Amino acid sequence: MMRRTFLTGVALLLALPASSSLAAQPLPRLVDKTLFVPTTGQGVRVHGYAYYTRCDGVEMISRYSEQTQSDKADVAFSRRSRDNGHSWSDAVPQVTHDQEPQGIMRTGRHPGFVDSDRDLLLVMILRGILPTDDPLEGMKHWTLHYSLSDDGGLTEYHQSQVIQTGEEFSANHPLPGVWKSRNSAMIGDTTCRPIQIRTGQILQPIQITPVGPGGEYENPGGGYTYHDAAVLIGTWNEARQLDWTLSERVRADPNLSTRGMIEPTLAEFPDGQILMVMRGSNDVKLDLPGHRWMSVSRDGGHHWSTPKPWTYEDGTPFYSPSSCSQLLVHSSGRIYWIGNISPTNPKGNHPRYPLVLGEVDRQTMTLKQVTLCTLDTRGPEDAERMQISNFFAEEDRQTGEIRIYAAPLFRKPPKPSDNPGLDWTADLWLYRVDVGD
């Protein structure tokens, strides 16, 4: 394989003129799909990803967990590669939960992100004591933390809770409008990855449960959960730590999206504008159109436009279920989006297929319909509620391919003799997509 020089998305966007024509570039093409981590048994889903640990080179960390129900890891593992993921060290168990007097302490680490100016590895961590270990209790109990490493993740030189700078903020009141045990701030999925913008600051997309007039978590849409989207803006200080500031929130009209704005993903464009693409929902109000939503910042992520349905280049909104998605700035300067698109109006979270990848127009911030490439979809033997979601994508530094890690659920319907409900058995797969030079 030819080795390619890898530059950060920010550096390439600054180097490429905004008028650069990408019309001659080949369309994205699925190269292959290979088994990354097999399941360990019936009813076990393997969820995971891999990421680079330094701003140069090919050393990687892979983290994966085993799940037997939604939004909860039973066990988790970490392993390392020195050869771009061709081989891996033995897996080391990681702590996912522990018994505390108040309940179960849940800990989840998100994919690492390397600051390209300092070669420091940032890992965001979600923690919370759930009284009965119900993930929905996280709406009031999740807290955000972060760790920093200067040796590629071998050790951590700093770990702390994310608390906005200022005397009024504390562990119990870490961010404006967020109070522990009343509401929470969280990272929605592995696709909600930080980005580094041209100022050198780190932007971490998050979601916040709103507080109602009674001072407690409120769900104005009546769906499964409700969130506002927002961005944590991290600025490096002299101690090589991050000072955090919360952006204004991106709020939905609950009459248009019953679960608010969820699982934001970010990309900076050549003119400095930042696009946020979000998951909405028509849960409990299926007559509403189910769309992907967009908002734009023109001041480094501090303020955001009113969210509106994201569209194709011709201005047509497309149907999309309530599921995660990811924006990715490629080393070529092109920007890609990975997510689910539906041929008809979805019903809340479903259908979460096909999984597609397409290019985003660098001038209009719209999705180029002609570039859409189907990565995977439901087969004739798969359950109707089969889903391909909760993935993670990163560019391969040696080939320029985009690698997507996903564990499709419910590939086949349960047999009559099985327990009622769908079978959670799922391997973790690696999809490789060629997007050209």
Image (cartoon, grey):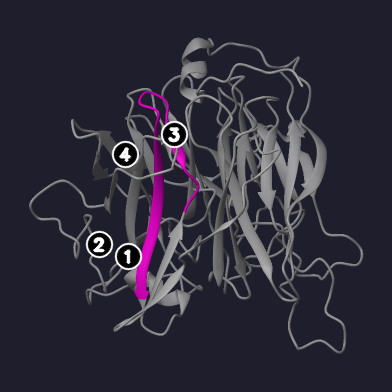
Question: What secondary structure is found at the residue carrying circle 2?
Answer: loop
Where is residue 322? Give x, y as percent. Answer: 60, 60
Q: Earlier in the sequence, mark 1 or mark 4?
A: 1
| In front: label 3 or label 2 | 3
Q: Residues within 10 Å of mark 2 (few under 14, many from 20)?
A: many
Q: Which residues are magenta?
A: 110-129
Q: Earlier in the sequence, mark 2 or mark 4?
A: 2
Q: Which residue is mark 3?
A: 114
- Residue 14, relative to residue 416: is it above or below? above
**Overall secondary structure of the magenta section:** strand
Q: Which residue is mark 2?
A: 178
Q: Which amino acid type corresponds to the residue marked 4 in the rendered image? A: His
Q: Is residue 236 left or right of residue 319?
A: left
Res 204 seen here: yes
Quadrant of residue 284 within the rendered picture: bottom right
Q: Which residue is mark 1?
A: 184
Q: What is the C-alpha distance between the residues marked 4 and 3?
A: 25 Å
Residue drawn at x 57%, y 35% is: 328
Q: Is residue 316 left or right of residue 111?
A: right
Q: Which amino acid type corresponds to the residue marked 1 in the rendered image? A: Ser
Where is residue 242? Give x, y as percent. Answer: 26, 39
Q: Which amino acid type corresponds to the residue marked 2 in the rendered image? A: Val
Q: Quadrant of the C terminus?
A: top right
Q: Residues within 10 Å of mark 1 (few under 14, many from 20)?
A: many
Res 206 seen here: no
| In front: label 3 or label 1 | 3
Q: Which residue is mark 4?
A: 303
Give whichever of 408, 386 is nearer the camera: 408
